[in-house]
Amino acid sequence: MKNPLRLAMLSCVLLSTLAQAADLIPIDVHRDANCGCCKKWISHLESNGFKVTDHVETGMSAVKQRLGVAPRLGSCHTAVIDGKFVEGHVPAEQVLALRKRNDLLGLAAPGMPLGSPGMEVEGRSEAYQVIGLTRDGKDIVVAEYPAH
Ligand SMILES: [Cu+2]
């Protein structure tokens, strides 16, 4: 390589790629093979700094039971981060906030609310809540969308 500037730029790109890889937050996502909105939610996480390990499952209800997701909080996919569950289309910012909450076993966006990440439908959205399940088994509202 004759051009030293080009070499410097190239190594710069390599370094920033390495730094990004180190900063990504690992999360496991369990989903059914036929779930399209689950894949969209995975893309939402990936574009918000997560490194997703995708687990395709044959029996999601058994997975949810094993991970401690109360049936009333159920949605499609179930993720696990730092030993806590994330059920359904929870926004990435709430997943980040969950990492600092030791009072919660997990978070859920019950059902499949239109307009939540991965559930975008042109011109349609509905209000929904992000629910936290506390260590003593209570549901608490952690966030409401759209934010107001
Ligand atoms: Cu879904």
Image (tube, rainbow, N blue to C red):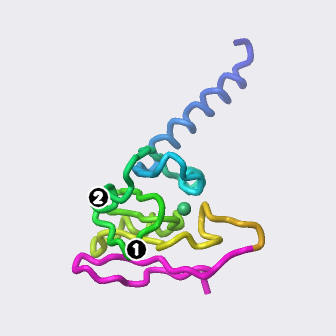
Compared with 72, 120 (above or below) is: above
Q: Is residue 24 above or below residue 75?
A: above
- Residue 69 x/y as whole percent: 33, 67
**Residue at coordinates 42% horizontally, 69% vertically from top-left?**
74
Is 134 one of the magenta-colored residues? Answer: yes
Q: Where is residue 104 in the image (x, y as percent from the top left)?
A: 31, 73
Q: What element carries label 2?
A: loop
In the rendered image, residue 80 lying in the magenta stretch gets the answer no
Picture mark count: 2
Query: Magenta part of the protein: which range?
Result: 124-148
Quarter occupied by the N terminus? top right
Kindly identify the amino acid type of the residue bearing the numbered disc 2.
Gly
Q: Residues within 10 Å of mark 2 (few under 14, many from 20)?
A: few
The quadrant where ligand 1 appears is bottom right
Residue receiving disc 1: 73
Task: Locate residue 142 relative to residue 9 in the image: left or right.
Answer: left
Q: In which quarter of the image is the C terminus?
A: bottom right
Q: Residue 83 carries which label?
A: 2
130 sits left or right of 101 in the view: right
* Identity of the residue furthest to the left in this view: 136
Which of marks 2 and 1 precedes in the sequence? 1
Residue 112 screen position, x and y as percent: 55, 69
Kindly identify which numbered label has been placed on residue 36.
none
Which residue is painted at 29% across and 78% down in the image?
134
Q: Tell me the SS state at disc 1.
A: helix
Identify which residue, 21 or 64, lies in the foreground: 64
Residue in the picture at 60% in, 82% down:
127
Mark 1 surroundings within 10 Å by alpha-carbon count, few (fewer than 14), some (14 through 19), many (20 or more):
some
Are the residues flagged by discs 1 and 2 in contact, CB closer than 8 Å?
no
Vertical side of 32 occupied by 129: above or below: below
Front: mark 1 or 2: 1
- Asked whether mark 1 lies closer than 8 Å to ligand 1, one says no
